[in-house]
Amino acid sequence: MVLKVAGRGSIPPFIVMDVMRAANEREASGKDVLHLEVGQPGTGAPAGVIAAVSEVMGRERMGYTDALGLPALRQRIARHYDDSYRVAVDPERIVACTGSSGAFVLAFLAAFEAGDRVALASPGYPAYRNILRALDIEPVDVLVGPETNFQPTPEVLDRVHGKLDGLIVASPSNPTGTMIGREGLRAIVEYCDERGIRLVSDEIYHGITYGTPAETALAFTDQAIVVNSFSKYYSMTGWRLGWMILPEDLVRPVECLAQNLFIAPPAISQFAGIAAFDCSAELDAHVARYARNRELLLAELPKAGFDKLASADGAFYLYADIAHLTNDSSEFCSRMLAETGVAATPGIDFDPERGTRYMRFSFSGSTEAMAEAAKRLIAWLG
Ligand SMILES: Cc1ncc(COP(=O)(O)O)c(C=O)c1O
């Protein structure tokens, strides 16, 4: 008998993972690969985290923690908002989660009903759309482009048909690296607050910026859900730890959901997270390397014909319009990998409609890898 498979799982794959597999297969067959497809730091956790974890392993049982996270971690995160943004946050509103990915599941379940409509920028991080779909919440794509620095604005949102229950923004964004300025963010917050739209601000790339530091939505409202993570600036992707700041009315619902869905985030990672806030010297050195990589690629990629790039004010991505090179970015990226050994991600992951003419380069790796990739791409296309 054929057993039923629920429709919830029939969401699109995360294509960058497929690209990574192709790159890994190439490597396994003995050929070299320059990894400009990966969306994670090329480094591990900072030394201060490793030292703190070795120490804590000897004295802690590593049992379940509170569902919302270790009180010491929640307090340390609150201090981070005071230190970095001059914003006071009650630790009671802070929730530790298994990465920002875990935060999205909890936040969407607590804030939205099945059938609600949640807007998100396209191009954008594909998991927003796919998690919403898996939870029977309707994602509403808001097409953005260079005219608005690939970010939503109140004017762009005004053009969306029908009532919205939520809006997800990310500044800096994946895949474009573009940011919403302080006043732009204030305008979006006001737009949402006036219309009863629940704002979800993904601030995972904060700390990785190349000019003005990023502003938190908490500077303007306590009604937004602010999501962050130890994966990017803190260079700890595999530790699977993130956090969110919730409006007061969502704390108890999220606590009940977290208790039942996950019990608690990994204890060891939470101890590690506390230590990570004291490692800024090492982490800022990574950001300095990303800045060098960014400069290098901004200077070299146009020589290969990649000359229509989003502004990349933060994160570690360059989003390139390649309409003059192909109308099938997947085929283009596969051919580029096969012929040059440079792996990058086709835009269809981020923008189902127009992504066939865009691609994303990640510059989170070493500067040597960026220089070599640029050399090969210039030889290939230049
Ligand atoms: C914009 C954005 N948000 C969230 C995530 C998920 O990160 P994590 O679950 O590791 O915190 C990513 C990962 O690439 C991302 O790019």
Image (cartoon, rainbow, N blue to C red):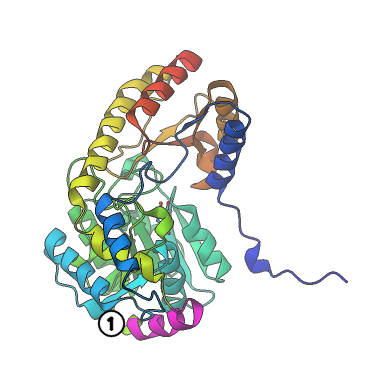
Name above or below for residue 345 compared with residue 64.
above
**Residue linked to disc 1:** 248
Of residue 338 and residue 33, the one placed in the foreground of this image is 33
Say how many tags the image has.
1
Image quadrant where residue 73 sits: bottom left
Asked if residue 31 is among those painted magenta in the image, a careful observer would answer no
Measured from the top left, where is residue 28 in percent x and y? 61, 34
- Magenta stretch? 251-263
Is 364 rendered above or below residue 86? above
Dividing the picture into quadrants, the one containing residue 92 is bottom left
Kind of residue sitting beneath label 1 = Glu
Q: Secondary structure at mark 1?
A: helix
Number of other residues with Cα within 10 Å of mark 1, as a class: few under 14, some 14 to 19, many 20 or more: some
Rendered-image quadrant of the N terminus: bottom right
Is residue 241 among what the camera can see? yes
Q: Where's residue 202, x and y in %?
A: 34, 60
Residue lying at the far right of the rendered structure: 1
Residue 19: x %, y % from top left: 56, 40
Q: Main secondary structure of the magenta part?
A: helix
Q: Nearer the viewer, residue 304 or 280?
A: 280
Quarter of image, ligand 1: bottom left
List x then y, in percent, for residue 264. Answer: 42, 76
Residue 353 visible in the displayed image: no
